[in-house]
Amino acid sequence: MSENRVRYEKKDHVAHVTMDRPDVLNAMDRRMHAELAGIWDDVEADDDIRAVVLTGAGDRAFSVGQDLKERARLTEDGVEASTFGSAGQPGHPRLTDRFTLSKPVVARVHGYALGGGFELMLACDIAIVSEDAVFALPEVRLGLIAGAGGVFRLPRQLPQKVAMGYLLTGRRMDAATALRYGLVNEVVPFGELDRCVAEWTDSLVRAAPLSVRAIKEAALRSLDLPLEEAFKASYPWEERRRRSADATEGARAFAEKRDPIWTGR
């Protein structure tokens, strides 16, 4: 029982986070959530990291969500079932309700992304998926609820009736349908998945890191604000970017006909 549930690697300003339980299709147990919490803390604290790739090990699944066998054991032991969010549970706040993570997260999805796995993808900023990807929130068929944000994010990211159809029936969605509705950024053959993800992370790493963080913060925090209020709201990362050396470096580099050198300061 000493093996980690998650692999975490850093290279060239990109953090690679891999859910590593391929024998159970990367089902997420309490131990995996605890490991992921430490990783997200490190991602936010390490200014050398400019982008994150989240994926699942093996070639069959991104993640099928909650480890239901563990959930059954916990129920037998008298552990109360959870509802919305992760408060009071291992790994809190999880990515699905960690609303202050300022680094962009790219979901690299193949095979099954079901339940909590689908909710993880919905919580990411960019999603690159293989043609074999399958999405669903099957909780309604199990007497459960998509409490890791599925009931909230899907109606925000799809037309309402389309979202309700998937939420209330647990029906599956293929990759082509997800692309048609704008749930994902690109769909590629499995053999091209890593190349496509690398193209996106390369673009993110080339961008000014403080601008990326400020844009993510402002875009997500203002979603439910009236437009006039969005302009007047306070965004801490934008205040930091506005007063940074990077804020003048871009224009200077353009004038000098050279590539900018970002310091994140």
Image (cartoon, rainbow, N blue to C red):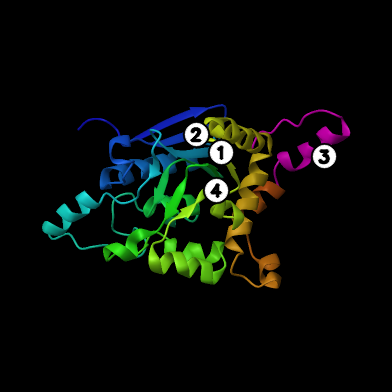
Q: Quadrant of residue 39?
A: top left
Q: Nearer the viewer, mark 1 or mark 3?
A: 1
* Whole-number angstrom distance, CA of label 4 to CA of label 1: 10 Å
Q: Nearer the viewer, mark 4 or mark 1?
A: 1
- Residue at 31 percent across and 46 percent down: it is 28
Disc 4 vs disc 2: Cβ atoms closer than 8 Å? Answer: no
Residue 176, image x and y in percent? Answer: 56, 50
- Residue at 82 percent across and 39 percent down: it is 251
- Does the magenta portion include 136? no
Q: Is residue 228 left or right of residue 128?
A: right
Q: Up-down: is 166 above or below 243? A: below
- Say whether disc 4 or disc 1 marks the residue closer to the N-terminus: 1
Residue 102: image tag: 4
Disc 2 vs disc 1: Cβ atoms closer than 8 Å? Answer: yes
Q: Up-down: is 116 above or below 221? A: above
Residue under label 2: 15
* Whole-number angstrom distance, CA of label 3 to CA of label 2: 28 Å
Residue 251: image tag: 3
Look at label 4 and name its amino acid: Ser
State which region is magenta.
243-265
- Does the magenta portion include 262? yes
Viewer can see residue 91: yes
**Quadrant in which the N terminus is drawn:** top left
Q: Secondary structure at mark 4?
A: loop
Foreground residue, 104 or 136? Answer: 136
Look at label 3 and name its amino acid: Ala
